[in-house]
Amino acid sequence: MPQSTLSDRGCATTPPLTGLPPVVARDTRLVVLGSFPGEASLAAQQYYGHPRNHFWPILSAVWGEDLVALDYPARLDALARRRVGLWDVYAACRRDGSLDRAIRDAVPNDLARLRALAPGLEAVAHNGGESARSRGITAALGVAVYRLPSTSPANATWSFARKCDAWREVFARHGLV
């Protein structure tokens, strides 16, 4: 997890940012955990709100349903129908820009609360490396824990097709495809 120190990147003057609430229902079987919403997501108050983020296109490919064409409430309904939830590992932080490496003074979400929110939880899928730093906490939930390639447009090391394959494999393991 990022250190709770101020950096030379100007975070000392950056006001704290507050993340988004969990999108988790009692029947959620798999929760996708990001790190912290980027600027576009915070401005829109939507998970994966940047138009170049691959999250919604990847799930569209995995499920054969054009989620990108839907408005945000309909996207969340599609996740709920498939028993997939969303949340982030950090509740708040300071950050200039949207890159995970710029996160400072991070305040973690109470991930242990996932069991109470979703009693039938089977798995947690960390969306990228920064989120995956919390694997110790999610592993303590007694569920399968996966590190998936980041859907961020900054993750250019994985092709879109390769990302889709990795995400599809994890979702298939839990009957979510």
Image: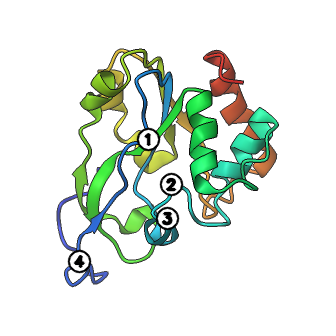
Q: Taking the image as drawn, is residue 13 in sight?
A: yes
Left or right side of 15 for 57: right
Q: Do the residues bearing badges 1 and 3 touch, measured as CB atoms within 8 Å?
A: no
- For disc 1, the marked residue is 23
Sequence-earlier tag: 1 or 2: 1
Which sits earlier in the primary sequence, circle 2 or circle 4? 4
Q: Identify which amino acid the numbered label 2 is placed on.
A: Tyr
- The residue shown at (28%, 53%) is 91
Task: Please report the residue visible at 52 percent of the width from the left and 46 percent of the height from the top.
Answer: 128
Dividing the picture into quarters, in which one does residue 69 lie?
Answer: bottom right
Q: Earlier in the sequence, mark 1 or mark 3?
A: 1
Label 4 and label 1: CA atoms lie apart by 25 Å
Q: Of helix, strand and loop, which one carries label 1?
A: loop
The figure's colour scheme reads: rainbow
- Look at the numbered discs 3 and 2 and tell me whether their residues touch, using CB distance below 8 Å: yes
Q: Position of residue 147 (x, y in %)?
A: 52, 35
